[in-house]
């Protein structure tokens, strides 16, 4: 205890304690947050920051949204968990509202994003055997290079990032990697046993990589032509982030399975879901898949409120409008160190030239000015503030980047 009593600040104490007891699987900025409201968060020293990460797009609705909070507290004091052994009165309306909003036939509720991905893989394989007629044990799923779909063993097994997969094998077979954004390569990869193509409409963790126009549309056509399920992972791009409810709408395509998570709860609680047409989801029968917490009444009540505020408060249109404004002002900075500004809605990246000294020092300089952003890989800074961002706040963000990059 002496070390701690002698140390300089609460921030330093808490960071030292984390280092002492925690698994070292993250390298966060040295800021310890204690409170959040809207686009802002406060650290334990009382400093205020504008949050330009939104917990990797899980708090699209802004921190501690009062209506989601109210729904959560009300439900938490009534009923939190029944398991799916019994029914609860929040699940049916959650299904109905979610399917109506997203134009889906069926939904499967899970908790984390990775679980939604795992669930989709199971459903697609089963569909492949029972409906497509793929020989037992031969189902193949095509994924994209530089994908990010989560951290389970099956998922990191088909990652192309050495850090994500190195040392964690052996991995599940049945996955094939095709370059992202290349429809011809996708076509060449499809074989008789291909059951699904799993892809992000915009690659988030890879650094906000937007595929060439027409890629998703062509992927949709190829999937239909070859009887392959198109699985769009919208866990990060979905629920308003890109200025549409789902990013697939930018290209006018419809997936067979759509995965959502993160902002489905507005950051209050882990809630994810697989959205499906009937043909595919109906391959699941009682006892074949499940989750103790999946579809629990607290999760459903929170998700219902999170979806309601997203639409009722115009956050999706706001993301489109303010996102355009912010992208334009970031592009106008024109600093020598900047290679490219790209994005859709409020999913934005500033990529620096390789020789510019890296994104981490830029993030630290932004932190000192009251803006929290996180580098992704070495040279890219992601900007993904809550979707309630105002024009004035967008302009302020651009000013801070201007000051740090010039
Ligand atoms: C975050 C993310 C996931 C994984 O979600 P978790 O809740 O962290 O398991 C999957 N896919 C994409 C595209 C993501 O951004």
Image: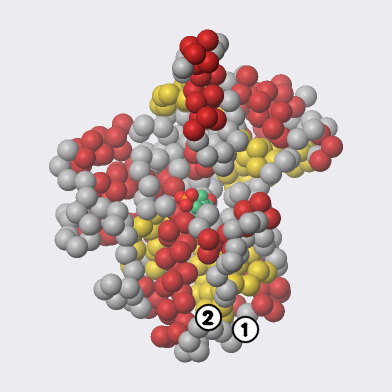
Task: Please tell me how crowded label 1 is: few (under 14), some (14-19), or many (20+) other residues with Cα within 10 Å.
Answer: few
How many numbered dots are placed on residues in this image?
A: 2
Q: Is residue 276 above or below residue 148?
A: below
Q: Is residue 298 left or right of residue 54?
A: left
Circle 1 sits in a helix, a strand or a loop, which is it?
loop
Q: Quadrant of residue 94?
A: bottom left
Q: Nearer the viewer, residue 173 or 98?
A: 173
- In the rendered image, which residue does mark 2 sit on? 139
Q: Between 48 and 309, which is closer to the camera in this rendering?
A: 48
Task: Give the residue pinned by disc 1.
Answer: 191
- Is the CB of mark 1 within 8 Å of ligand 1? no
For the question of whether residue 340 can be seen, the reply is yes
Q: Residue at x 54, y 24 (%)?
A: 16
Q: Residue 80 in the image: x percent, y percent?
A: 21, 46
* Mark 1 touches mark 2? (CB < 8 Å): no
- The answer to whether 235 is drawn above or below residue 360 in the figure is below
Front in this rendered view, residue 194 or 276: 194
Marks 1/2: CA–CA distance: 10 Å
Which part of the image, by quadrant, shows the C terminus?
top right
Where does the image place residue 65, in percent across and percent down from the top left? 35, 33
Q: Is residue 93 visible?
A: no
Q: Residue 64: where, in percent of width, then height?
A: 36, 32
Residue 334: % across, % down: 78, 32
Assess disc 2: are there few (<14), some (14-19) or many (≥20) residues with their C-alpha within 10 Å of its C-alpha.
many
Q: Quadrant of residue 130?
A: bottom left
């Amino acid at each position: 205890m002496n070390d701690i009593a002698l140390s300089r600040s609460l921030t330093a104490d808490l960071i030292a304690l984390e280092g002492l007891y925690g698994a070292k699987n993250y390298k966060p900025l040295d800021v310890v947050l204690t409170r959040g409201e809207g686009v802002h968060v406060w650290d334990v020293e009382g400093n205020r920051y504008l949050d330009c990460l939104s917990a990797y797009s899980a708090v699209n609705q802004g921190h501690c949204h009062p209506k989601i909070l109210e729904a959560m507290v009300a439900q938490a004091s009534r009923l939190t968990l029944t398991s799916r052994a019994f029914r609860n009165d929040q699940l049916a309306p959650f299904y109905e509202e979610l399917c109506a909003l997203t134009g889906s036939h069926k939904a499967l509720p899970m908790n984390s994003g990775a679980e939604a991905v795992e669930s989709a893989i199971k459903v697609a394989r089963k569909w492949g055997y029972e409906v497509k007629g793929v020989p037992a044990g031969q189902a193949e799923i095509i994924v994209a290079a530089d994908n990010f779909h989560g951290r389970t063993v099956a998922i990191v097994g088909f990652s192309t990032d050495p850090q994500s997969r190195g040392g964690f094998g052996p991995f599940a077979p049945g996955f094939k990697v095709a370059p992202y954004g290349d429809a011809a390569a996708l076509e060449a990869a499809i074989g008789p046993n291909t059951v699904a193509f799993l892809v992000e409409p915009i690659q988030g963790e890879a650094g906000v990589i937007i595929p060439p126009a027409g890629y998703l549309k062509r992927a949709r056509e190829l999937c239909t032509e070859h009887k392959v399920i198109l699985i769009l992972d919208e866990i990060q791009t979905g629920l308003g982030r890109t200025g549409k409810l789902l990013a697939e709408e930018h290209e006018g395509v419809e997936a067979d399975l759509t995965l959502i998570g993160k902002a489905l709860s507005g950051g209050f609680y882990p809630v994810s879901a697989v959205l499906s047409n009937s043909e595919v989801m109906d391959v699941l029968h009682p006892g074949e898949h499940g989750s103790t917490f999946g579809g629990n009444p607290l999760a459903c009540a929170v998700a219902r409120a999170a979806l309601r505020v997203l639409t009722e408060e115009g956050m999706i249109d706001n993301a489109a409008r303010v996102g355009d404004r912010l992208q334009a002002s970031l592009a106008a900075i024109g600093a020598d160190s900047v290679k490219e500004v790209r994005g859709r809605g409020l999913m934005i990246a500033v990529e620096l030239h390789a020789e510019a000294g890296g994104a981490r020092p830029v993030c630290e300089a932004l932190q000192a000015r009251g803006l929290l952003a996180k580098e992704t890989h070495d040279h890219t800074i992601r900007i993904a503030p809550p979707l309630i961002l105002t024009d004035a706040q967008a302009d302020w963000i651009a000013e801070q980047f201007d000051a740090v990059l010039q």
